[in-house]
Amino acid sequence: MLKTLLRPAHLLFAILLLIHLLPNRTVGDNFPLYVIIPALALEAAVWFAAWRLKKSNADLYHDIACFIYFSLIAWILLTAKSNFLRPGLFPPPGAVFAQLLSDHAKVWLNIRTSLGIILQGYLLGVAVAVPLGLFLGWSVRFGNAATYIGKFLGAIPPVVYIPYGIALLPTFRSASVMVIFLAAFWPALASTMSGVLNVERRIIDAAKSLNVGKTTMLFQIILPAALPEIFIGCNQGLGVSFILLTAAEMIGARSGMGYYVKNYSDLGDYTRTIAGVIVIGVVVTAMVFFVNKLQRYLLRWKR
């Protein structure tokens, strides 16, 4: 029991609680409860994981908690407790979390706007790229030409299309969907073609010996074998899509998390700016988590 209590996460949690006893150097309410209550919830999750989950998963919860506790401790010490960082630019975490809760309706509306654009453009890009990549990768003649063309077009940063999309398409949303489509399409296409080309020859020969048709060969044999490389491109496209969407929303949007951050930074409201940055990080992490879960499910046969 003593060994469990002395684990780094629990010690950092105790330090996080104790530093709130130090006097504040900043003016105004620092909202300590908005830090303590989430920390208590996280600590409960760490204890639950240690008792109910297998060791590898429990260790993951523990390590994540260590990072969060350490970040909060450093943040509080550098702001509320020492005033080392300028309060106008770096508000304490309690103030940021309190503002985030106060703006929850507005934040949720902007999240929905951003996610709607991401999902529409990203899913459309992957849905077009994967079947096309299967066909081009399987065809030697078209595949060789498509490889060079894809390298050229894929090397152009999709961000350069943002001004043209805004100028040519009727709405900002349609321009954003176009840019996200391009950001997801080229990595997914390249990784699909690469995955098809790298399928083990013995698998193809075994399927041919059973007189498997072309459609069955592509979608039931080649596609599952190429999935590991396909997901590499899909993950790359997802990360680039969020970066581009945030940049586009900062340029010409009137909603979305990029607009939320840019708007309040222009107004000098850095409490809301930091809150928006945190929300963007959480949303991106959640999206990547779900894609990784899907990847593990579809590749469960590899275990």
Image (cartoon, rainbow, N blue to C red):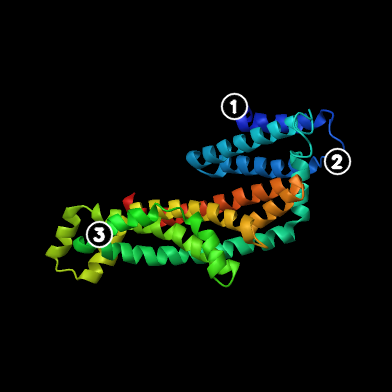
Q: Residue at x 77, y 34 (%)?
A: 86
Q: Quadrant of the N terminus?
A: top right
Which amino acid type corresponds to the residue marked 3 in the rendered image? Ala
Residue under numbered circle 2: 29
Q: Which of disc 2 and disc 1 is earlier in sequence?
A: 1
Real-space Cα distance between discs 3 and 1?
62 Å
Tell me where residue 129 appears, x and y as whole percent: 37, 63
User: For mark 1, does the 10 Å Cα neighbourhood hold few (<14), some (14 to 19), or many (20 or more) residues?
Assistant: few
Identify the element where label 3 is drawn: helix
Real-space Cα distance between discs 3 and 2?
64 Å
Which amino acid type corresponds to the residue marked 1 in the rendered image? Lys
Tell me where residue 99 appears, x and y as whole percent: 77, 50
Q: Which of disc 1 and disc 3 is earlier in sequence?
A: 1
Is residue 238 positioned above or below 31 on the image? below
Q: Quadrant of residue 234?
A: bottom left
Q: Residue at x 53, y 44 (%)?
A: 53
Q: Quadrant of residue 43?
A: top right
Q: Residue at x 14, y 59 (%)?
A: 205
Residue under numbered circle 3: 145
128 relative to 45 in the view: left or right:
left
Q: Residue furthest left?
A: 209
Which amino acid type corresponds to the residue marked 2 in the rendered image? Asp
Please say if the residues under marks 1 and 2 sit with CB atoms less than 8 Å apart: no
Residue under numbered circle 1: 3
Identify the element where label 1 is drawn: helix
